[in-house]
Amino acid sequence: MSDATLHAANQDPDSFAVQIADQVESFIVAVTEVAKGDEPDSAVPFLLLEVSQLLLAGGRLGAHEDIVPDERYEPDLGPEPDVDDLRERFAALLEPIDVYSEVFDPYEPRKAPVACRISDDLADVVTDLRHGLAHYRAGRTTEALWWWQFSYFSNWGSTASATLRALQSLVAHVRLNQPLEELDGLDTDEDLSEESLADAAGRVMAEEIAGPLGLRTVK
C-alpha cells in the first residue's frame, strides 16, 4: 500500500483535504492517460470534462478561507518531475488545434490577446498539482492544501480556466456547425497585436476536429 493510500486511510473520506486530493490525483491520472494517444477520437471532449471537474476543486479552494501552512518555510521536495514528455505528447495529439488566443487578465484594460498552447497549459497545471500532491503523500496535508490554494490563485486556476474556454469553444464550433478559422502563422513565440491576431485567420475548418470529437463533418 502506498504512502498516499495509508495517509488517506487515516482521514475521513468526506473531509475537504481528501476530496481535493482525490480530485487532483484523478485529474493527473486522467490527462496522463489521454496524452498516451490511445483514444484520440475522444481526447478533446474528455479533456473538457476533466478540466471542468478540476476547476470545481479550484473553486472550492478559492472559496475556502486562507489556508496557512504549518511551517514557515516550505519543505524541500527535491527536483520536480519532468513534464516535457506530457507536453510533447499533447502537442502532437492536438497539433491542428493546440494554439489559441487568450487575454490573461480581463480587468486590465486594452490588453491584446496573446497566443497560448493547450499542451503547455496542461503540462503547467499538472506541474503545480503534482507539487502539492507530493506534500500530501508525505503527510503534510495543510502544506498541500496551502500550495494548491496559493497556486490556484497565482497560476493553475487562470491557466486551467483559459484551457477550458479553448476546449469548450472547440466543441461548440463543431456542435453548432461553425467553421474554425486557421490560426495561420500564430505562434506563442510571436508578439502579436490584437489586430494581428484578428488578421491571423486562415482555413482549418471544423471538420478537422469533427472526426476526433466523434461528431458529424461540417458541410
Image (spheres, grey):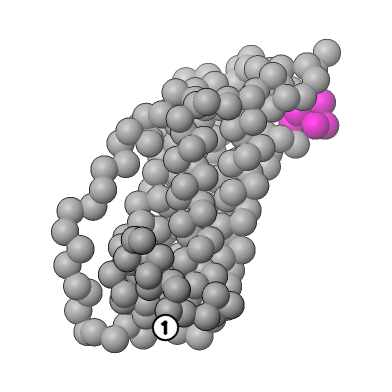
Q: Quadrant of the C terminus?
A: top right
Residue 211 is at least partly visible in this image: yes
| Residue drawn at 20 percent across, 63 percent down | 77
In the image, residue 87 above or below residue 160: above
Q: Nearer the viewer, residue 161 or 147?
A: 147
Q: Quadrant of residue 63?
A: bottom right
Q: Quadrant of residue 130?
A: bottom left
Looking at the picture, how far across and down is residue 135, in whole percent? Answer: 30, 68
| Residue drawn at 26 percent across, 48 percent down | 81
Q: Which residue is mark 1?
A: 67
Q: Is 150 left or right of 72, judged from the image as shown?
A: right
Q: Magenta stretch?
A: 173-178
Q: Nearer the viewer, residue 178 or 87?
A: 87
Q: Amino acid at mark 1?
A: Ile
Looking at the picture, how far across and down is residue 217, in whole percent? Answer: 78, 16
Q: Tag 1's secondary structure?
A: loop
